[in-house]
Image: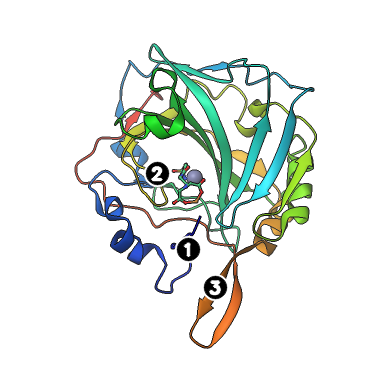
Amino acid sequence: HTEDWAYSSDTEGPQFWAYAHPLCNGTKQSPINIIMKETIYNETLTPLVPLNYSTVFNDANYYLANNGHTVKLGIELDTRVPIGLLWRGNEYHYHGLHFHWGENDQHGSEHYFNNQSYALEVHIVHYLKDYGDFNSALNYSDGILVWSSVFQTSNSSETSNTPLQDVFKSIDKIINAENKTYINPLPLSSFVSENSTGSYYHYEGSLTSPECTESVMWIVNHKMISISSNQLLSFRLLKGRLHNSSNSVWFENLTNTDRPTQPINGRKVYTSVL
Ligand code: B30
Ligand code: ZN
């Protein structure tokens, strides 16, 4: 299908998304800047209960794909075992996982903490099981749950993230849009920091790219994941879609794949952290 939006600052960038995608002008948009001292403690924010997050499906195909907007990790699984989450009495099923990153280590995450952006953010996308599939769930304000973790680089004696080493190395194989490569099976729990199911921020928002549908229960982990600067480099070499303007044609650089933070418009941000 044709894609008419991009992250670059030209006429397809975030400021222009709403012309073709009016929902992007909504009042409950994502991402946001999370100001920790303004978050509200809420005792109903019980720990997430992951379903099969630590299972490695050795009979499934795990792949990385460059879809022209981001790097997506997909799992091709024929046996219908649920992968997902239980949260506040609801069951959410895993839909996919992808990343947002920047051109340097100080920039790239979509959510900010206290006005600060970080190098990388992973979004583990789920839909409420009762709504049947991802596309149907988009029609409901609580249809989608995105579990997000922010990554922080640390220069102190190379804190390479070993569980994710394989994944990051394979990014070199999907430089161009529509490239896909199979990777070694790994547990989804590699994408969240240990014991972080109980410490998170929660607010109601949207998909962070067109259609910008306002159907997302956001769960942003309080604990960040460590990553070395080197592990990020291959993200910044990725190429996006072919751009066509009157006198030239080029491949978009796929970097700064983060939408600017959006107005809070009186929404409350809750925390499970006392
Ligand atoms: S995020 O987690 O809020 N960043 C989507 C899922 C999660 C997020 C953002 C977007 C998503 O699935 N959007 C629909 C994407 N597509 C369909 C597609 O597969 O390829 C519609 C589109 O763009 O307009 Cu291309
Ligand atoms: Zn995302």
Q: Nearer the viewer, residue 140 or 32?
A: 140
In front of the other: 248 or 25: 248
Measured in 3D between alpha carbons, the distance from the residue under mark 3 to the one under mark 2, in whole angstroms, is: 24 Å
How far apart are labels 1 and 2 at the CA level? 14 Å
Q: Where 105 falls versus 150 (above or below)?
A: below
Between 32 and 79, the residue placed more toward the observer is 79
Q: Which mark is residue 207?
A: 2
The residue indicated by pointer 3 is 243
- Residues at marks 3 and 1 touching, judged by CB atoms closer than 8 Å: no
Q: Residue at x 56, y 59 (%)?
A: 102
Instruction: Give the amino acid at mark 1.
Output: Tyr
Local secondary structure at mark 3: strand
Question: Which three-letter amino acid code belongs to the residue tagged 3?
Answer: His
The residue that label 1 is drawn on is 7
First in residue order: circle 3 vs circle 1 = 1
Of badges 3 and 2, nearer the viewer stands: 3
> In the image, is the residue at mark 2 within 8 Å of ligand 1 by its beta carbon?
yes
Mark 1 vs 2, N-terminal side:
1
State whether residue 252 is above or below residue 91: below
